[in-house]
Amino acid sequence: MGVSQPCIVPRSNRNDNFIDKSFTVMADLIVKLLPINARSKEAYVYYRDGLSAQNDGDYAEALENYEESLKLEDNPTDRGETLKNMAIIYMSNGEEDRAIETYRQALEENPKQPSCLKNMGLIFEKRGRIAEEEGRQDDADRWLDQAADVWTQAVRLNPGGYLDIENWLKSSGRSSVDVYF
């Protein structure tokens, strides 16, 4: 008798909880009915499996699925969403430079993603605070100015959606334009 090989089952076929299974069934049905080409449908399946893996904390599997989705997806909005999710993983893994670069790629695909700008600002603001604590005021000002730049763009795209950022921009005096409602 030989040793049996483990059967690799796509994530979409092995969700254990009822809500995930229900979502997968509904998503599959919608994808089948949508008038989009097979390549886009396959890209969506990889994206969905990546999102499921990301939600489960399996970041390596999520990134693999997102990479496959990007190879197939032509729609800039969908590509931007995929890249944004990849950047979130990089950010949570402490790969801040890679996250920033991936957020920039996501914004090139779809400039109307204020959450990318917000998250980039979080990285810049953190770096600014660290530089300030270390007595490197010039570096701190540079990082905090970068945070203000991207956060101002985020607030313009999503007025009222980031009240804490709006307050920071006002209280820090780093907002050159009144972008608030």
Image (tube, rainbow, N blue to C red):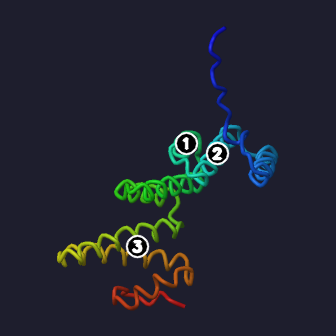
Residue position marked by numbered label 2 in the rendering? 49
Query: Quadrant of the rendered structure where residue 178 is?
Result: bottom left
- Amino acid under disc 2: Asp
Q: What element carries label 1?
A: helix
Q: What residue type is labelled 3?
A: Val
Quadrant containing the C terminus is bottom right
Instruction: Give the residue pinned by disc 3.
Output: 150
Q: In percent of the image, x 64 and y 45: which residue is there? A: 49
Find residue 141 and report its horizontal and vertical position in percent. 24, 78
Q: Mark 1 points at which residue?
A: 61
Vertical arrangement, residue 89 with respect to residue 62, above or below = below
Q: How crowded is mark 1: few (under 14 residues within 10 Å), some or many (20 or more)?
A: some
Q: What element carries label 3?
A: helix
Q: Is residue 92 above or below residue 125?
A: above
Q: Which of marks 1 and 2 is nearer the N terminus?
A: 2
Q: How far apart are marks 1 and 2 (CA)?
A: 9 Å
Say which amino acid is labelled 1: Glu
In what quadrant of the picture does the N terminus appear?
A: top right
* Count of labels in the image: 3
Label 2, secondary structure: give it. helix
Q: Residue at x 51, y 45 (%)?
A: 63
